[in-house]
Image (cartoon, rainbow, N blue to C red):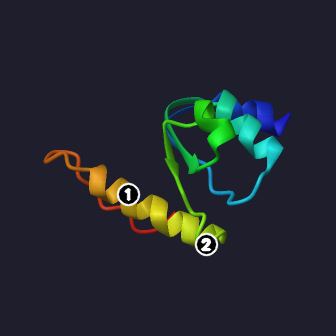
Amino acid sequence: EAALKFSRQPFDLLISCHSTENLPLEFISATAIAKWRVGNYDEKKTACYDMMINTSSNKSTSYLIEQIVSFLNKINTSKFHRTKITNL
C-alpha cells in the first residue's frame, strides 16, 4: 500500500539509488509519476529511466549517489533556477 501511494505522487525528478538489482524499487521507479527518472545503468532496463549512470567500476550505492549528484550538477545550467545539489 505504501509503495502504491508513493508511486502515485508526482515528482519533477525521481532518483533511484540502488546499485544492484532490486525489483520492487525498479517497479516503483518505472511506474512512478515523474517528469525525469535517474538510475543505475542496466542495458535491459533502459526504458525505466531517462538518464542512467554506468557504475560498473564501483557497485557501491554511495558511489552511484556521488555520480548522480555530479552529473545533475553538470546539466543544471539554468541561470534562474540553478541550485547546486550537495546531498541526497
47 or 80, which is in the foreground?
47
Q: Residues within 10 Å of mark 2 (few under 14, many from 20)?
A: few
* Kind of element beneath mark 2: loop
Return the x and y of residue 21 as percentages of the image width and height. Answer: 77, 52
* Kind of element beneath mark 1: helix
Q: Residues within 10 Å of mark 1 (few under 14, many from 20)?
A: few
The disc placed on residue 39 is: none
51 or 1, which is in the foreground?
51
The residue shown at (79%, 37%) is 3
Residue type at tag 2: Asn
10 or 75, which is in the foreground?
75
Residue type at tag 1: Phe
Image-quadrant location for residue 30: top right
Give the position of the N terminus as an image quadrant.
top right
Q: CA distance from mark 1 to mark 2?
A: 16 Å
Instruction: Give the residue number, with chain letter if any, for mark 2.
Output: 58
Sequence-wise, the earlier of marks 1 and 2 is: 2
Return the x and y of residue 8 as percentages of the image width and height. Answer: 67, 27
The residue shown at (19%, 45%) is 78
Q: Residue furthest left?
A: 79
9 shown above or below 59? above
Residues at badges 1 and 2 in contact (C-beta under 8 Å)? no
83 shown above or below 31? below
Instruction: Give the residue number, with chain letter if any, for mark 1.
Output: 71
The residue shown at (56%, 37%) is 49
